Image: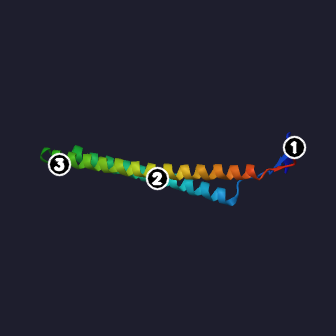
């Protein structure tokens, strides 16, 4: 414990707790997973676009419609993944704020 100028003492935290480290690692894995899925979706879209470009004129309209449908589905999947990640990030931030508040509440004042 370290004294402060107002006579209170605070607990010094030496690094993150195992639970905090675990939560950060989980969040990093989720970010990597979303990034990987987005990367795969992008390449899938590029491959489908290549099919559209290489299609004969008789199939061009059909391939173009497939491509547009594919993009709309991918956009929705991406939005869903990002929304899920945002929720998890907000939960993590709320947990850390609660943790900080708990630490501050555990301050031992010598009043």
Q: Earlier in the sequence, mark 3 or mark 1?
A: 1
Disc 3 and disc 2 in contact, CB within 8 angstroms: no
User: For mark 2, does the 10 Å Cα neighbourhood hold few (<14), some (14 to 19), or many (20 or more) residues?
Assistant: some
For the residues marked 1 and 2, what is the alpha-carbon distance in whole angstroms?
Answer: 44 Å
Residue lying farthest to the left in this orientation? 58
Which residue does the numbered mark 1 point to in the structure image? 7
Disc 1 element = loop
Residue 80, given in percent of the width and then of the height, sits at: 40, 51
Residue closer to the observer: 59 or 22: 22
In front: label 1 or label 2 = 1
In front: label 3 or label 2 = 2
Residue closer to the observer: 111 or 66: 111
Residue 98, given in percent of the width and then of the height, sits at: 65, 52
Quadrant of residue 6 in the image?
top right
Report if residue 43 is visible in the image. no
Disc 3 element = helix
Residue 68, given in percent of the width and then of the height, sits at: 25, 46
Which residue does the numbered mark 3 point to in the structure image? 62
Q: Earlier in the sequence, mark 1 or mark 2?
A: 1
Which residue does the numbered mark 2 point to in the structure image? 84
């Amino acid at each position: 414990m370290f004294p402060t100028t107002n006579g209170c003492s605070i607990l010094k935290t030496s690094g993150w707790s195992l639970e905090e480290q675990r939560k950060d690692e989980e969040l990093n894995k989720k970010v990597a997973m979303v990034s990987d899925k987005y990367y795969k979706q992008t390449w899938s879209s590029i491959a489908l676009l290549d099919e559209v470009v290489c299609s004969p004129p008789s199939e061009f309209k059909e391939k173009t419609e497939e491509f547009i449908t594919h993009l709309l589905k991918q956009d929705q999947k991406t939005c869903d993944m990002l929304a899920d990640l945002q929720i998890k990030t907000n939960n993590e931030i709320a947990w850390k704020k609660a943790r900080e508040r708990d630490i501050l509440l555990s301050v031992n004042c010598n009043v």
